[in-house]
Amino acid sequence: MFEIVEKRELAAGIYLTRVKAPRIAHSAQPGQFVIVRADEKGERTPLTIADYDDAEGTVTLVTQAIGVSTRKITAKGVGDSLADVAGPLGRPSDFVNEPLEELRKRHLVFVGGGVGTAPVYPQVKWLAERGVEVDVIVGAKSKDMLIYKEEMAKVATNLYIATDDGSEGFHGLVTALLENLVTEQGKHYDGVVAIGPMIMMKFVTLTAKKLELPCTVSLNALMVDGTGMCGACRVTIAGKTKFTCVDGPEFNAYDVDFDEAMRRQAMYRAQEQHANEHAHKCNCF
């Protein structure tokens, strides 16, 4: 059992949960994820690690309450426990293994959309602690849905906000802001990393290509089982079948078949809707 030591709502339906998991906290690296079960009969839910503290032995998760399993996770409070938190799983971000002297010569920009902003944080934090310049673009529909703004401001070289409705920061999409930074403000970047909704990552990739910038995306939203056994996270990368959970979750954006990935992401929507309706009827949350 993994005790919850902190829980707070970051935005409507989006919750931060910090759990005691010393072994995972000791081994975790940026870009990795864990598999969570709320209770003994719970579904395996993959969640990207939003932070980890080896000294405190804690791991931070950010969950959006959408389906039955995520609602069960977010229903738990401080003092409660999660049945399982297994990990760290997946491959760490590629930059973890780059020579530090080479990494410090680069200026990266991260683009986080919605809940995808949370897993951007440990990557930017890791780089900042090693003296690497990192700009961050955080996007949301409105200022009320922005998360990790204060935390990101402490670790990013520059933090830029974009909201669809213009309620805070740049009025428009993250893609428009990225293009504005490069073409209008003269920013120079050596690479882009995007984490967020699949459609957002697709268009960030198209924008990065237009700007002739290398681009990396995280396909964590496709995962189900997390071990490569279920096959639900199959994705075509450079014409070859890969498994997001064991070969990723991060890939070269230009190799990803986004249209196929979005079709796969939508495969189980009918089952998810049925499960939600059943859970509401039996008050299972």
Image: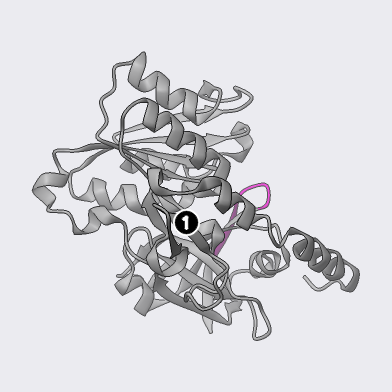
Q: Which residues are magenta?
A: 6-13
For disc 1, the marked residue is: 236
Q: Nearer the viewer, residue 91 or 120?
A: 91
* Image location of residue 57, percent across then percent down: 37, 73
The image shows residue 17, relative to residue 83, as above or below, that is above
Q: Nearer the viewer, residue 285 or 178?
A: 178
The answer to which quarter of the image holds residue 179 is top left
* Image location of residue 232, percent across then percent down: 58, 68
Q: Which amino acid type is marked by label 1? A: Thr
How many residues crowd mark 1 within 10 Å: few (<14), some (14–19), many (20+)?
A: some
The answer to whether residue 134 is magenta is no
Any part of residue 197 in sight: no
* Image location of residue 106, percent across then percent down: 19, 38
Q: Residue furthest left?
A: 101
The quadrant in which the C terminus is found is: bottom right
The secondary structure that dominates the magenta segment is strand
Is residue 16 rendered to the left or right of residue 71? left
Which residue occupies 57% across, 62% down?
A: 7
The answer to which quarter of the image holds residue 155 is top left
The answer to whether residue 8 is magenta is yes
Which residue occupies 33% across, 15% down?
A: 185
Which residue occupies 52% across, 77% down?
A: 3
Give the SS element for disc 1: strand
Q: Residue furthest top?
A: 184
Is residue 130 rendered to the left or right of residue 157? left
